[in-house]
């Protein structure tokens, strides 16, 4: 479909769609501990039995079948994971009605105040209350190993400005090579001066994200899968573990939640020359999918990756390439992927390819959609541009023939140094980390439902395994690929079940086509993107 026609169609259809009610003017309930199970409705329709109760008729789900279709007895044939970057839950949904948001009094004024930190000392007299930040560009804070601990500050959840003041220095590096370099640099400096790591956005800045939350499912207890940065988060996302290996032998691998890719660069000859399957010797979920004949693709954005190889906040842009291991593209480094002959399943120019597959009815059973920096919502990407990119992806699924059999999971991989008031639960050596925004979008979810279950991206693996693999876990004792991982993350006692967000007894929800509201992001998706952030 030509981009101009598609954009016109989206704008025309948007007028016929409702984005739900208006924000609740009252105070949102707050909290300081990890969430409990269950959920609440914010006004949408909900009823019947959840997917977790069994099949569509309330019985037990069917065993996995021999093809890539209905393996669990439910009409989910396509799981789409859209992973954005660097936002905390409170930064995007801290004032959303019915969610566990920023603690506020009856007048809606935040009751928490984050002390400033200057010249190595606390400044309690000039503490900063969470505030409505209308700026499109945000600086946030550092996310290197140890920064989550600084932000949590012994459980007080008030060290966010200490982390910024202690280790975060401003430079032009994140803006180098951007068409708006001067404006970008100014915005970053301004964000730090405004203490924007304590700011939050509302429906005014992110109307589409709030519309999805009102009409589908918002998860207010989705924690970052680990307590450091993006490289281990993406390894956990596809494999349930983050480790460093000294050879292709799985038993040479040891726990590593820091994973300095700059060091791997030196050891493995430079990530820029596609080092091959010599980095990660343990099993990832694509190994299980391949064994069961379940199709998958990893759609990789065109442009530069959002993070630096060593976890620093600033560095020159690093190009993304489907055959090259990088922070946001770990799968080419897995021995399993090469052995299965599926390196080609990591797709370059991923946004355009995903839209074509969605509109053409050729989506695989499992998709990961990964942005480049210009649409990632990571510094120096703007909020509006990222939202428009995500909206364009979701619109394509809703307009395509696979909408009726698709579950879209939208999340952000780490908290980006932004304020959140909930202390993460400890599940093992690596996490969890601070809460991130997360939504579930499907015709089969409970409309207007806020899920309070404790979750992480481990829950995506668990859902994929339950729907397509008959419940087989990435468990070295039973999956056919022994490795020394210390635990099976999908089996963590605290981890909730995404199937609780679905109701197959309900009338399927209609598509909600929304206007992207940013033409540059639409241009990016339809093939006119590049390395520059708009």
Image (cartoon, rainbow, N blue to C red):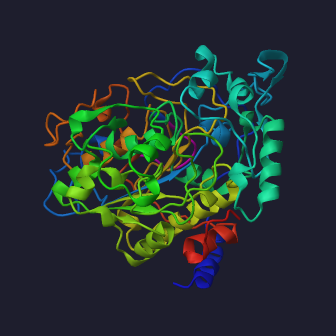
Q: Position of residue 107 (x, y in %)?
A: 80, 28
Looking at the rendering, which quadrant does residue 100 occupy? Answer: top right
497 horizontally vs 307: left or right:
left
Whether residue 527 is visible, yes or no, is yes
Q: Residue furthest right?
A: 125
Determine whether 196 is above or below 79 in the image. above
Q: Residue at x 59, y 16 (%)?
A: 155
What's the magenta region?
40-47
Determine whether 303 is above or below 13 in the image. above
341 horizontally vs 166: left or right:
left
Q: Position of residue 378 (x, y in %)?
A: 63, 49
Whether residue 468 is visible, yes or no, is no
Determine whether 167 is above or below 394 in the image. above
Identify the main secondary structure in magenta.
loop
Looking at the rendering, which quadrant does residue 232 occupy? Answer: top left
Report if residue 330 lies within the magenta region.
no
**Which of 42/284 is in front?**
284
Q: Residue at x 73, y 52 (%)?
A: 205
Report if residue 41 lies within the magenta region.
yes
Q: Residue at x 25, y 46 (%)?
A: 466
Q: Position of residue 131 (x, y in %)?
A: 79, 35
**Which of 179/199 is in front?**
179
Q: Considering the image in quadrants, where does the C terminus appear?
A: bottom right
Q: Position of residue 266 (x, y in %)?
A: 45, 45
């Amino acid at each position: 479909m030509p981009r101009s026609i598609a954009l016109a169609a989206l704008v025309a259809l948007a007028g016929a769609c409702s984005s739900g009610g208006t924000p609740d003017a009252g105070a949102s309930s707050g909290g300081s501990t990890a969430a409990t199970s269950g959920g609440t409705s914010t006004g949408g329709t909900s009823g019947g039995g959840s997917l977790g109760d069994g099949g569509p008729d309330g019985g037990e789900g069917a065993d996995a079948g021999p093809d890539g279709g209905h393996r669990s007895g439910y009409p989910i044939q396509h799981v789409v994971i859209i992973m954005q970057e660097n936002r905390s839950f409170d930064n995007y949904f801290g004032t959303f009605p019915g969610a566990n948001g920023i603690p506020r009094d009856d007048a809606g004024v935040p009751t928490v105040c984050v002390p400033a930190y200057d010249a190595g000392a606390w400044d309690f007299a000039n503490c900063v209350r969470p505030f409505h930040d209308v700026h499109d560009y945000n600086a946030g804070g550092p996310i290197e190993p140890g920064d989550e601990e600084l932000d949590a500050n012994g459980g007080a959840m008030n060290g966010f400005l200490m982390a910024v003041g202690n280790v975060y220095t401003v430079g032009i590096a994140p803006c180098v090579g951007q068409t708006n370099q001067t404006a970008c640099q100014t915005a970053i400096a301004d964000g730090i001066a405004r203490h924007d790591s304590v700011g939050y956005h509302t429906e005014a800045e992110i109307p589409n994200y709030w519309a999805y939350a009102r009409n589908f499912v918002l998860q207010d207890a989705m924690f970052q899968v680990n307590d450091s940065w993006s490289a281990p988060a993406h390894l956990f996302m596809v494999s349930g573990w983050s480790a460093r290996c000294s050879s292709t032998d799985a038993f040479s691998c040891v726990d590593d939640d820091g994973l300095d890719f700059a060091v791997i660069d030196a050891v493995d000859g430079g990530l820029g020359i596609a080092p091959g399957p010599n980095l990660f010797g343990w099993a990832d979920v694509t190994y299980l999918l391949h064994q069961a004949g379940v199709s998958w693709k990893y759609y990789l954005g065109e442009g530069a990756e959002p993070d630096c190889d060593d976890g620093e906040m600033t560095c020159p842009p690093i190009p993304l390439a489907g055959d090259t291991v990088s922070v946001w593209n770990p799968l080419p480094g897995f021995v399993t992927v090469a052995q299965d002959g599926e390196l080609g399943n990591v797709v370059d120019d991923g946004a355009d390819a995903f839209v074509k597959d969605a509109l053409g009815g050729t989506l695989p059973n499992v998709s990961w959609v990964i942005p480049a920096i210009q649409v990632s919502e990571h510094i120096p990407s703007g909020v509006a541009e990222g939202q428009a990119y995500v909206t364009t992806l979701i619109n394509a699924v809703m307009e395509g023939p696979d909408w009726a059999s698709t579950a879209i999971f939208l999340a952000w991989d780490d908290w980006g140094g932004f304020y959140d008031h909930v202390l993460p639960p400890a599940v093992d050596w690596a996490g969890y980390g601070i809460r991130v925004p997360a939504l579930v979008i499907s015709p089969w979810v409970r409309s207007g439902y806020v899920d309070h279950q404790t979750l992480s991206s481990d829950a995506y693996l668990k859902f994929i395994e339950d729907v397509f693999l008959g419940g087989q876990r990435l468990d070295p004792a039973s999956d056919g690929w022994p490795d020394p991982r210390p635990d099976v993350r999908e089996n963590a006692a605290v981890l909730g079940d995404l199937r609780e967000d679905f109701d197959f007894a309900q009338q399927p929800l209609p598509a909600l086509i929304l206007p992207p509201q940013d033409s540059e992001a639409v241009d990016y998706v339809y093939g006119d993107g590049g390395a520059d952030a708009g």
